[in-house]
Amino acid sequence: MAQWQIVEHSRQTRLSRGIEDGVILIMDAFIFLQMEHERIEQQLDEFIESFDQMTNEKRFECTSLIFDEIKKHFTHQQSLLSRSSDDVAEFLTECSKDQNDIVEAMNDLLMSHVDDLNFGTELRKLSKSFDVHLKHYRDKLFVQYREQLSTQELRCMDSQVTDWMLGSTPANRFQ
């Protein structure tokens, strides 16, 4: 379940966000990244599970939608982790390389045909790479990154995530 903080804001802030009761819920940025990742991973797993029963057209549509979600997740991750110090610069470089490798694998997969015998196998490999990516950076990069930021910087990140969430599309576009 999501972890939210209750934050009091001035009347002007409440009105600008359209909230009248004086309470705004703020999402923790790192939990958001983890939840977003887990949601995509679940969608990938469901897609892989039902892959054989889908038409080629539906396979391509779902592949494109999921890959767009992965790219959006990486954009969120890069945006939130853009302020770095030397302590995490190496991890950020490694993270960016992993993201590029995953995007390249997605592009290669899209260039093959959805009824290709290797498509399902490559999709499973991609899912595993995506999972390894989260676990590696959640336990190392996110911990170090959180420790280097001030409370104000963390709140700013949390607010940015909350804005994304309030303006985003429904969580599951694939049903």
Image (spheres, helix red, strand yellow):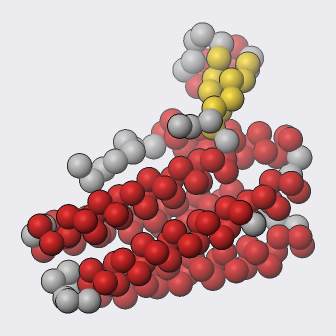
Residue 10: percent from the left, percent from the top? 74, 17
Camera-side residue: 83 or 52? 52
Determine the residue positioned at 34% across, 78% down. Answer: 123
90 or 46, which is in the foreground? 46
- Picture quadrant of residue 154: top right
Left or right: residue 69 versus residue 2 is left
88 displayed left or right of 69: right
Image point 20% across, 64% down: which residue? 50
The reply to whether residue 78 is in sight is no
Image coordinates of residue 117 in percent, x first then y, are 20, 89
Asked if residue 124 shows in the view, the reply is yes
How many dots with numbers? 0
50 in relation to 38, above or below: below
Q: Residue at x 23, y 49 (%)?
A: 175
Q: Quadrant of residue 151?
A: top right
x, y percent for residue 102: 49, 79
Q: Would residue 64 be found to the left or right of residue 117 on screen?
A: right
Choose between 100 and 135: the one closer to the eye: 135
Residue at 50%, 77% in the rendered image? 129
Q: Where does the image place residue 166, in percent across and percent down from the top left?
A: 51, 35
When the figure is inspected, residue 34 is found, relative to residue 28, above or below; the finding is below
**Quick check: 42 left or right of 19?**
left
